[in-house]
Image (tube, grey):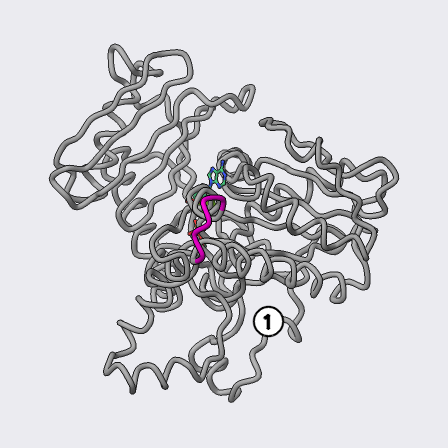
Amino acid sequence: MKILVVNAGSSSLKYQLYDMNDESVLAKGRVERIGMDTAILVHEPTDKPELKEVSEILDHNVAIKKVVDCLVHPEHGVISSISEVEAVGHRVVQGGDLYSESVLVTPEVKAGITSLFDLAPLHNPAHMMGISACEINMPGVPQVVVFDTAFHATMPEKVFMYPLPLRLYKKHKVRRYGFHGTSHFYVSHVAAQFLDKPLEDTKIITAHIGNGGSVTAVMGGKSFDTSMGMTPLEGLMMGTRSGDIDPAIIPFVMGKEGIGPMEANFMLNKHSGLQAISGGSSDMREIVEGMEKGDKGCKLAYEMYEYRIRKQIGAYVAAMNGVDAIVFTAGVGENSAVLRLSILEQLSWMGVDVDPELNKIRSGEPRLITKEGSRVKVLVIPTNEELVIARDTHEIVKKSHK
Ligand SMILES: Nc1ncnc2c1ncn2[C@@H]1O[C@H](COP(=O)(O)OP(=O)(O)O)[C@@H](O)[C@H]1O
Ligand SMILES: CC(=O)OP(=O)(O)O
Ligand SMILES: [Mg+2]
């Protein structure tokens, strides 16, 4: 079965086409700057030359049409007809308390995702545009949605509730949901295979550090706590997001600067984090480069970012009364040896004995970066959210055919 995996954002759309016979990727690609007349499409077939194009792509419908054209393209295509694609799997960031697992898209599910727009205004509307675009361009093909929040559905009440008036939870579903669940699920289960222990007895801390970042305490294979909350803004300092701040700052700044709630939200999501403190860049590579050249803003941004991740890991050791392994994943977690070393050197108190040489090795494979005998093992595991989405989609569609 061939499955198309779609991750639709507000102005971008990433895709991968899988052949589920051997879980191989036939092609992947991305469309950026959707809504502009200079949108960029990059299509990368596994065994054929890449295709790059700049053109007008005004909405997600046109974007999916372009993706379909690429997949069947005489020179760059990987299938002869779009009817070879038997299912589509979508990443959906917010499933609220409606979904604790992946589901087949039905009119009810679409209404469910739409009812959660308020809880993920930057993400869910874009996902719905992706789903509609696939319905139009691949009529009759079953679609499945895989939620970032689903893996965190096991968090206990004491973890997911906020100490706020109860009516806010009852009326508006104000509670912690957590995100990046597909990634935390994948890397924690790969990590468990490295530990010579039954999954039920494992305590693993997973650090998904990309543009957005979150740390999860995974106990017995289940999410116990995670650093993101009702929205992907809570927790760590991120590329452009503030993460945790004193909530009283928000009304204070709104009053002082004369801004409304939308602007305040925009500031916290898009103009904070590494970018704000470094004075320009949200990219860890540039932050480290700047720091090495003596840039004070980059140095402070790096130190704050590192400190907040380390503090979160420490908190989850306390939350689980111990830890067997720590996992680093996603863009920064997989690639920044410098950042991993800064964090791990200061966790020696709890039995982390990092091997600086192993830490430096670059590879696309899961790998151990602690010395033999380190009481807590540390692993770098490349995440693969798309593979999890393809597997769930495959399972659900197979079942629905029975
Ligand atoms: N070699 C590297 N060293 C440090 N950071 C890197 C490196 N390569 C990529 N990154 C970081 O990874 C981030 C993107 O991570 P990714 O997980 O792809 O994010 P997202 O899925 O949220 O877009 C970039 O912002 C960049 O800072
Ligand atoms: C939920 C979330 O923060 O996703 P991303 O890291 O892809 O922005
Ligand atoms: Mg990501």
The structure residue drawn at horizontal position 14% and vertical position 32%, both measured from the top left corner, is 55
> How many C-alpha atoms fall within 10 Å of the one at disc 1: few (<14), some, or many (≥20)?
many
Determine if the magenta segment contains residue 294. yes
Q: Main secondary structure of the magenta part?
A: loop
Measured from the top left, where is residue 87 in percent x and y? 41, 33
What amino acid is found at the position of numbered circle 1 in the picture? Phe
Q: Residue 191 appears in which quarter of the rendering? A: top right
Residue 203 visible to the viewer? yes
Instruction: In this rendered view, identify the residue nearer to me: 299 or 64.
Output: 299
Check mark 1 vs ligand 2: CB closer than 8 Å? yes or no: no
Q: What stretch is highlighted in magenta?
A: 292-296
Q: Is residue 145 visible to us here?
A: no
- Residue that appears at 35% across and 29% down: 29
In the rendering, at what x and y percent does residue 397 appear? Answer: 49, 36
Q: Where is residue 30 in the image (x, y as percent from the top left)?
A: 32, 34
The residue nearer to you, when weighing 326 against 56, is 326
Residue 88 x, y percent position in the rendering: 39, 36
Q: Left or right of 364: which side holds 32?
A: left
Does residue 118 lie above or below 143 as drawn? below
* Quadrant of the rendered image containing residue 90: top left
Report which residue position mark 1 lands on: 160
Instruction: Label 1: state its secondary structure.
Output: helix
Q: Is residue 53 above or below residue 325?
A: above
**Position of residue 257 in the picture relative to residue 277 (left or right):** left
367 left or right of 122 in image = right
Q: In this view, does 364 lie above or below 337?
A: above
On whether residue 312 falls in the magenta region, the answer is no
232 over 255 or under it: above or below: above
The front one of 164 and 2 is 164
